[in-house]
Every structure is written in structure tokens, then in C-alpha cells.
Amino acid sequence: KAGVTQTPRYLIKTRGQQVTLSCSPISGHRSVSWYQQTPGQGLQFLFEYFSETQRNKGNFPGRFSGRQFSNSRSEMNVSTLELGDSALYLCASSLEFGQGGSSPLHFGNGTRLTVT
Amino acid sequence: DQQVKQNSPSLSVQEGRISILNCDYTNSMFDYFLWYKKYPAEGPTFLISISSIKDKNEDGRFTVFLNKSAKHLSLHIVPSQPGDSAVYFCAASGSQGNLIFGKGTKLSVKP
């Protein structure tokens, strides 16, 4: 069974630009979550989508947005990029909504975004 | 404020010995605790979890212990192998469903 696939693996953008990251979950998984990983803050929750609806959102500004399609694939968009947005963006999928031990997250390998 | 803390950024252990990774939390409403392992250039991989109603869960070489009164959990790896060298993240799941991660502990297992 294929794992969570994220594209692209690496991305370099300049300040002020916008970027879209893509995530294909494990087949049969209906929930997709996004996390930002930085050396100083660790893994921080961005949002979770289930059945094309955002079910939960972390404490990030409105420049960060996402969506989920009917086939459970998800995209994340960051507008007006800032230097501090440089990070590893991780997508994770699970069978059902909620990320407790009964339905643990399966992560992709991430997209490394560098903002210059 | 960090709700999930891993106070040791790194840990070095000899092959064959026990590795003990620790995690503290502040919110008594967390209902599940999980451990993830991360190799460089890869996403985190789920290792083991424990419900807040239990105090121990075992899976092969990995055992997680939960001490609710101390708001502390630990991951024991016995015996440790060089392939276990990775960053280990502790995470907690609360009522809103999202996972709150600690900042990780880098484990090095020396042959």
C-alpha cells in the first residue's frame, strides 16, 4: 500500500510570493492533517480536513489555508510568504477524524520550503 | 506555553542496553499519548500509543509507561539497536483531536 505522498519535496520562494503544496493520503484514509516543523518550535498543527471540510485549525495566521478534494487529496496554500515560513511542511493521513491512539497519523516525507 | 515537554534534547546509549525517553505534559484532559520516530529526510513514523486509562502498553522492544499523577510518560526500548538512532517525538491528543508534539529527543545508539 502506498504511503502518504507529498509534492514537491523541495521548494524555494521569495518573500511576498505564494505557494501551494500537495498531499495524497494513503488509500482509504479520509482525514488529512498538516503540520509545520521548525527547529525552534518543533511540530505545530496547522489544520485537519475530513470529508472536504476543515474540522480543526491551529494557531496560524489566515495566510495559511488548505482544502481537501472529494478523493481526499489535499492542498495547502501560503500567501504573502515571510522568511519565518521557511520550514518542513508535513502532511499526515488517518482513517478517521481525530488523531488519537485509535487512529494514529501516518506522515509523508514533507515539503521543505525555503523563503529567501 | 508548552503542553508537552521533552526536556532532554539528546540521549546516547550503548547497543543492547535500555533507552529511556521521557516526556512531561501539563494538561490532564489529554486522552491519548503517542510516540513517533523520525529519521532525517523522512516524515515521523508512528511507534506506539497509550490511552489515558492505562498505565502501560507494550509492543515488542517498545514499552510506554504512563504516570498520570506525575503527568509523565516514558518510552523504553530494550534492547537498543543502532537502527533505533533517530529523533523521538512524544505527542498528546486532546478533546479537539489535534496532536500536540514535544520538541523531540535525538537518540544515538552506539555499536
Image (cartoon, rainbow, N blue to C red):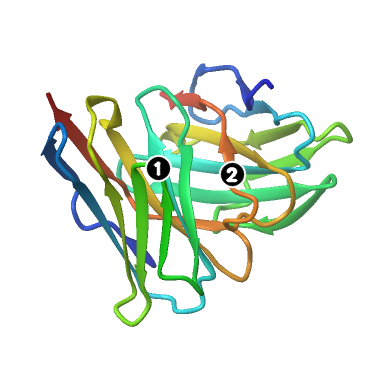
Q: Chain of mark 2?
A: A
Q: Chain of mark 1?
A: B
Q: CA distance from mark 2 to mark 1?
A: 20 Å
> Which quadrant is home to the N terminus of chain B?
bottom left
Tell me if label 2 and label 1 are in contact, CB under 8 Å.
Answer: no
Of labels 2 and 1, the one closer to you: 1
> Which quadrant is home to the C terminus of chain B?
top left
Mark 2, Cα crowd under 10 Å, few <14 / some 14-19 / many 20+, is many
Residue at 29% of width from left, 25% of height from top? B83
Residue type indicated by callout 1: Gly
Image quarter for residue B37? top left
The residue to which callout 2 is attached is A105
Residue situated furthest front in the rendering: B60
Q: Nearer the viewer, residue A80 or B93?
A: B93
Q: Relative to A100, is A115 above or below?
A: above
Residue situated furthest bottom in the rendering: B69
Residue at 43% of width from left, 33% of height from top? A87
Whole-percent x and y of residue B108?
Answer: 18, 33
**Circle 1 sits in a helix, a strand or a loop, which is it?**
loop
**Circle 2 sits in a helix, a strand or a loop, which is it?**
loop
Whole-percent x and y of residue B16?
Answer: 16, 35
Residue type indicated by callout 2: Leu
Q: Nearer the viewer, residue A92 or A45?
A: A92
The residue to which callout 1 is attached is B60
Q: Relative to B42, is B63 above or below?
A: below
Residue at 63% of width from left, 67% of height from top? B96
Residue at 68% of width from left, 58% of height from top? A56
**Residue A80 visible in the displayed image:** no
Whole-percent x and y of residue A48?
Answer: 68, 50
